Amino acid sequence: MAKLKSKVNRFFYRNRSKGVRNLMLYIGVGNLVVWLLTMLNPSEPFFYELLRLSPAQVLSGQVWRLFTYPLVYLCESTPILGILSMLFFYWCGSILEQYWGTLRFNAYYLSGVLLTDLAAVAVALVALAEDSLLGLMISSVLGVGFIGYVNFSLLLAAATVIPEEQVRIWFILPVKMKWLAWIDLGFTLYEMIRGLISVLKLGSAAGLSMYLLLLIPLVAVANYLLFFGKQAANILPDFLRYHPTHKSWTRQMKQQTAYSDAGLGRSGPRGSGAQARFRCTVCGRTELSNPGLEFRYCSKCAGYRCYCQDHIHNHEHITE
């Protein structure tokens, strides 16, 4: 498994510039065009109905819906909130594309879309097999809002890459990316629990498809874990990720002693006279700029390459 993962990583690294560049820009512009065309005749939203995810119609042969439903996000949300969300997801996509490369980011987004497709079609098949009124209702409206789960996986990914980055909600409230991810996870869990309570109230009238429908948000989380694995720990609170009593902290202190005279120190804040002993090769943070941040050295990189706790497990190894 480790060898396969290494080969996949090398493939994406060697072909990082291939694929559709600025994918989120195209998706954002496509959303705007579809929304404007839909607003021309809101009583009969032809283009929205043509492109939205409808598993029942996919099963009847309209397979293009499996790939076009990312273009109806604006149509399924309020205009102001939808536009602000698209700008935010464009920013998340740009961060991921710069960090991963074009090809890997394309693969991540496409994987989220296809996994959501499979889940939606599976629930639709179960609903149709139940041959009940509720099952028919579910199969007819299934797919509405599912692109929100795909975009949710973008937030999780960006928060893992830049967990300490601050964003301003509604341009006012500053929140770190990792906490924003947890807030969104909390709302998602709340909606799942509320939906489960509603289904349980139906009793025997509720079919299996209604319970499966509640699990759709987990598809985004599964896609996220598929690409990040253990790196998902980056969005955990600091007290869960590391602690001075952990062995990793002890190893860091030993490394600090071993490499303190290796010529790696750089000047600290201007006028402070302090020397930074650790500086992350990826983000440039030091123990002076971020007290308490953990640093390690990568044995697979050429030379003494130092990385912070957020990048030690998710950087491209330097061989030259």
Image (cartoon, helix red, strand yellow):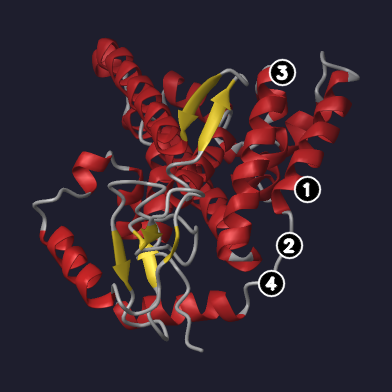
Residue count near mark 1 (Cα–Cα under 10 Å), binned few <14, some 14–19, many ≥20: some
Residue name at image x 49 percent, y 59 percent:
284
- SS type, badge 3: helix
Q: Which residue is mark 3?
A: 80
Residue name at image x 34 percent, y 57 percent:
231
Residue 128 x %, y %: 46, 35
| Nearest the eye: 131 or 124 | 124
User: Which one is earlier in the sequence, the residue at label 2 or at label 3?
Assistant: 2
Work out how far the residue at label 4 is from the one at label 3, CA to CA, in angstroms.
33 Å
User: Which one is earlier in the sequence, the residue at label 4 or at label 3?
Assistant: 4
Residue name at image x 28 percent, y 38 percent:
237
The quadrant of the picture occupied by the N terminus is bottom left
Q: Is residue 231 above or below residue 56?
A: below
Q: Amino acid at mark 2?
A: Val
- SS type, badge 2: loop
Residue 7 x %, y %: 44, 82
Residue 109 x %, y %: 58, 53
Work out how far the residue at label 2 is from the one at label 4, CA to CA, in angstroms.
9 Å
Work out how far the residue at label 4 is from the one at label 1, CA to CA, in angstroms.
17 Å
Q: Which residue is mark 2?
A: 20
Does residue 62 appear in this view? no
Q: From the viewer's perspective, is 64 left or right of 13?
A: right
**Are the residues flagged by discs 4 and 1 in contact, CB closer than 8 Å?**
no
Q: Which residue is mark 4?
A: 17
Q: Which residue is mark 1?
A: 26
User: Which one is earlier in the sequence, the residue at label 1 or at label 2?
Assistant: 2
Q: Amino acid at mark 3?
A: Ile
